[in-house]
Every structure is written in structure tokens, then in C-alpha cells.
Image (cartoon, rainbow, N blue to C red):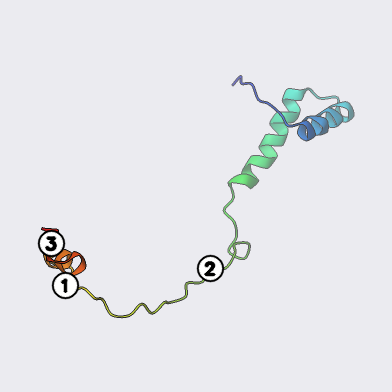
Amino acid sequence: MRTTITLEEDVAALLRQLRRRSNKSLKELVNAALREGLPRLMEEPKAKDRPRFRVRPLQVGKCRLPALDDVAEALAAAEGEAFR
């Protein structure tokens, strides 16, 4: 596949250093880096790495509407009889 990418300056500098040391082409180095890095990016975070999430119950009191099965009755209780 042929594509154009824009590298950030720090990444480009690392690739230039690696290219000088390894005597490999830019294409080979980018492919090698992607082959090594992409599987790590695709891994699911482990349970211990995820932040803990707790739900705290909140007491909000009794429902003030008589029954939510009848929409007209619920609107009458919430809005008053003038809603009609």
C-alpha cells in the first residue's frame, strides 16, 4: 500500500538516527516500527491498569408522580391540568 504520512519532528529525528545506525531504508524502518507497535496499541488494557470506578447510591426520595404507565396522568401531575 502506498500512502503519505506526516511525521512529528521527534519521530522523524528518531527515524533519521536509526537509519544512520542500521543502514536500512525508511520504508523498512517504518514497517518494522509499525509491526512492533501496532499489536501493543490493539491490546485491551489489563484490569489492574484500568482506574477503579465506583457507583455511589443516591437517595432521591419517593416518586412524586402517581403512575408512569399513564402519560396523560403523569403530565397532569407534573404540569397541571392546563397541559392539555
Work out whether mark 1 precedes mark 3 in sequence or the reverse, and give the earlier one. Answer: 1
Cα distance, mark 1 to mark 3?
19 Å
Quadrant showing the C terminus: bottom left
Cα distance, mark 3 to mark 2?
44 Å
Cα distance, mark 2 to mark 1?
33 Å
Residue 72 occupies quadrant: bottom left
Tell me the crowding category of disc 3: few under 14, some 14 to 19, or many 20 or more residues within 10 angstroms, Cα based.
Answer: few
Q: Residue at x 19, y 64 (%)?
A: 79
- Tell me the kind of residue under disc 1: Ala
SS class, disc 1:
loop
Comparing marks 1 and 3, which lies closer to the viewer?
Answer: 3
SS class, disc 3:
helix
- Tell me the kind of residue under disc 2: Phe
Tag on residue 67? 1
Work out whether mark 2 precedes mark 1 in sequence or the reverse, and give the earlier one. Answer: 2
Q: Nearer the viewer, residue 40 or 65?
A: 65
Residue 70: image location, x then y, percent: 12, 66
Whether tag 1 and tag 3 are in contact, CB under 8 A, the answer is: no
To which residue does mark 2 refer?
53
Work out whether mark 3 precedes mark 2 in sequence or the reverse, and give the earlier one. Answer: 2
Tag on residue 82? 3
32 on left or right of 58: right
Residue 47: image location, x then y, percent: 58, 64
Residue 75: image location, x then y, percent: 17, 64
